[in-house]
Image: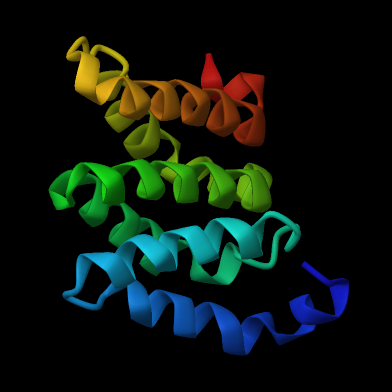
């Protein structure tokens, strides 16, 4: 994304969050994808939205269809990377969910397991080794 776009984050992020609450699963999935693409270059700008964002991502991960769960995990990863140490209050919840998912052994759900493994690493890197231990 172009750096000039990030100055509109106060307008763009609420729109993405709104789409994450749409009942249509296609909107939810695309909103997670947009969130991943947007926050990757935001560097901490997601911090004011962490409470609402993580609440919704956990809901999508807990109750969504598998493709939505995969995108929710990617969005958690991107959010953690953007927030850095500010992600620490969400560490236990995120890691707890990833621990459950990395035990998946069904062949049709291996992508979900892969994303969860990657997410655990991103979250650990974001919060630092002292929190991760």
The quarter of the image holding the N terminus is bottom right
Residue at point 60%, 63% (across, down): 47
Q: Residue furthest front?
A: 108
Q: Nearer the viewer, residue 130 or 17?
A: 17
Q: Is 106 situated above or below 39?
A: above
Q: Position of residue 32 (x, y in %)?
A: 43, 60
Residue at point 41%, 75% (across, down): 17
Judge from the rendering whether residue 26 lies leftward or rightward of residue 87; answer left or right. left
Number of callouts:
0
Q: Residue furthest bottom?
A: 11
Within the image, what quadrant is residue 2 found in?
Answer: bottom right
Applied colour scheme:
rainbow
Q: Is 62 situated above or below 30?
A: above
Residue at point 71%, 86% (across, down): 8
Judge from the rendering whether residue 23 lies leftward or rightward of residue 33; answer left or right. left
Within the image, what quadrant is residue 13 found in?
Answer: bottom right
Q: Nearer the viewer, residue 69 or 87?
A: 69
Q: Is 66 situated above or below 83?
A: above
Q: Is 125 situated above or below 18?
A: above
Q: Position of residue 125 (x, y in %)?
A: 65, 28
Q: Position of residue 40 (x, y in %)?
A: 68, 54
Q: Position of residue 83 (x, y in %)?
A: 63, 52
Q: Residue furthest right?
A: 3
Residue at point 49%, 31% (across, down): 119
Judge from the rendering whether residue 128 lies leftward or rightward of residue 18; answer left or right. right
């Amino acid at each position: 994304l172009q750096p000039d776009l990030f100055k509109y984050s106060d307008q763009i992020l609420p729109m993405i969050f709104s789409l994450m609450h749409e009942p249509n699963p296609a909107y939810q999935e695309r909103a997670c994808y947009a969130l991943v693409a947007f926050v990757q270059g935001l560097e901490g700008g997601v911090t004011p939205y962490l409470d609402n964002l993580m609440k919704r991502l956990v809901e999508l991960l807990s109750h969504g269809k598998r493709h939505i769960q995969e995108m929710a995990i990617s969005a958690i990863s991107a959010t953690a990377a953007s927030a850095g140490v500010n992600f620490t209050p969400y560490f236990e919840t995120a890691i707890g969910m990833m621990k459950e998912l990395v035990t998946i052994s069904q062949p049709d759900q291996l992508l979900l397991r892969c994303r969860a493994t990657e997410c655990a690493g991103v979250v650990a890197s974001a919060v630092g080794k002292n929190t991760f231990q």
